[in-house]
């Protein structure tokens, strides 16, 4: 079953590899919405996300021969979008990880519980998070990456990723609980 | 995974709230892919290794083409030579016999005329066939037609010879009867 998932849209992908613009467009149509949202969550600015998305698709189609079904096409593409978006933030000198170093983190387990679970509130909460916290929450909670993958994306250690995530989550819950 | 994390995971799709301008984005992607394609082809031809390789390929091509052509010409010459030999042999034979016919006193003028006009026709046909032959040497049909042409001439001469013999016989018989 897993291999079946890996080969999703194999036909379109193979045709796109040989430069068939029609198949490339079909793949684009299938993934554009999800990819745009991934980039928007990281960048928060429409124009920036559009630039990154265009760039990502062009790069993906140009380097499609490098895609060998080791992951799904979606996750391969998503990784390109995320890497480009994170690099864009770095170029703009927007912190992608909290400025404080993780050594100062002490295992505080007295996390306050969340009062109400609500997607709109969570979205608002994430938007209000400091820049450094936002990305780790996005990557772990919404994009579903594990700490090893996040450590690669953000170029930090996986233990840093873990501790930063816990801090970010705590901060997020605090913010959500203050929202009416 | 705590409840908060679970809740987000289960409602993941609700976090996709933005709608991209699909057409606008694709038009840019399309333009860039086309531009990259052109650039790739240009840089491909700009690479010095490719230039050298292309020059080598062209040289090899020119060399092999000239050798093929000269070889073909040589074999053409050879075939032409053989054909010419055959041609001159038959020509001589035919013209010799035509002279014989012309000078034969025993044949009537009418028969001579008829024979020579046939011969002229065959001559014309023969010339046409030779022209065709120069245009495409290896055409079997034309070769066959040329042979047929010669055969007809020989047949014609043979017929004439038969006629002469017959007239001789009838003359003899007449003499005998008389």
Image (tube, rainbow, N blue to C red):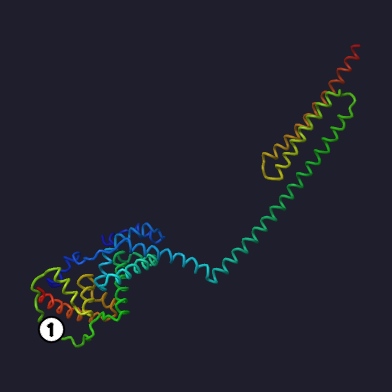
Q: Looking at the picture, how far across and down is residue B174, in whole percent?
A: 89, 14
The N terminus of chain B sits in image quarter: bottom left
Above or below, A11 relative to B159: below
At mark 1, the secondary structure is: loop
Give the quarter of the image for residue B103.
top right
How many numbered dots are placed on residues in this image? 1
Q: Please state if A34 lies on the left or on the right of A68 as rendered.
A: left
Residue A35 percent location from the top left of the image: 28, 66
Residue marked by disc 1: A108
Q: Nearer the viewer, residue A167 or B167?
A: A167
Q: Left or right: where does residue A50 sit relative to residue B63? A: left
Nearest to the observer: residue B128 or residue B83: B128
Residue at the outermost top position: B178
The x and y percentages for residue B79 are 73, 47
What percent of the width, then of the height, locates residue A53?
A: 32, 68
Q: Is residue B37 left or right of residue B3?
A: right
| The quadrant where residue A48 appears | bottom left
A150 relative to B23, above or below: below
């Amino acid at each position: 079953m897993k291999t079946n998932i890996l080969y999703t849209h194999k036909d379109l992908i193979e045709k796109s590899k040989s430069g068939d613009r029609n198949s490339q467009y079909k793949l684009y149509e299938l993934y554009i919405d999800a990819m745009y949202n991934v980039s928007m969550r990281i960048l928060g600015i429409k124009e920036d996300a559009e630039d990154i998305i265009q760039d990502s698709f062009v790069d993906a189609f140009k380097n499609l021969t490098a895609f060998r079904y080791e992951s799904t096409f979606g996750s391969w593409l998503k990784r390109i979008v995320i890497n480009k978006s994170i690099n864009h933030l770095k170029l703009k000198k927007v912190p992608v990880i909290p400025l404080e170093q993780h050594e100062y983190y002490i295992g505080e387990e007295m996390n306050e519980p969340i009062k109400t679970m609500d997607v709109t509130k969570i979205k608002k909460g994430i938007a209000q998070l400091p820049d450094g916290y936002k990305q780790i929450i996005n990557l772990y909670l919404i994009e579903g990456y594990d700490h090893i993958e996040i450590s690669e994306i953000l170029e930090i250690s996986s233990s840093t990723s873990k501790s930063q995530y816990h801090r970010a989550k705590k901060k997020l819950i605090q913010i959500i609980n203050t929202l009416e | 995974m705590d409840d908060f994390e679970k809740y987000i995971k289960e409602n993941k799709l609700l976090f996709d709230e933005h709608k991209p301008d699909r057409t606008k984005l694709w038009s840019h992607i399309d333009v860039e892919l086309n531009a990259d394609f052109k650039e790739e082809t240009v840089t491909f031809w700009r690479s010095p290794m490719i230039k050298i390789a292309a020059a080598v390929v062209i040289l090899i091509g020119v060399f092999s083409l000239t050798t093929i052509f000269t070889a073909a010409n040589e074999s053409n010459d050879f075939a032409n030579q053989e054909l010419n030999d055959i041609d001159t042999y038959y020509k001589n034979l035919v013209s010799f016999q035509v002279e014989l016919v012309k000078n034969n006193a025993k044949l009537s003028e009418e028969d001579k005329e008829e024979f020579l006009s046939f011969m002229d026709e065959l001559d014309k046909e023969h010339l046409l066939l030779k022209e065709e032959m120069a245009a495409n040497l290896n055409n079997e049909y034309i070769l066959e037609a040329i042979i047929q042409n010669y055969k007809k001439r020989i047949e014609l001469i043979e017929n004439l010879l038969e006629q002469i013999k017959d007239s001789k016989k009838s003359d003899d018989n007449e003499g005998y009867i008389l």
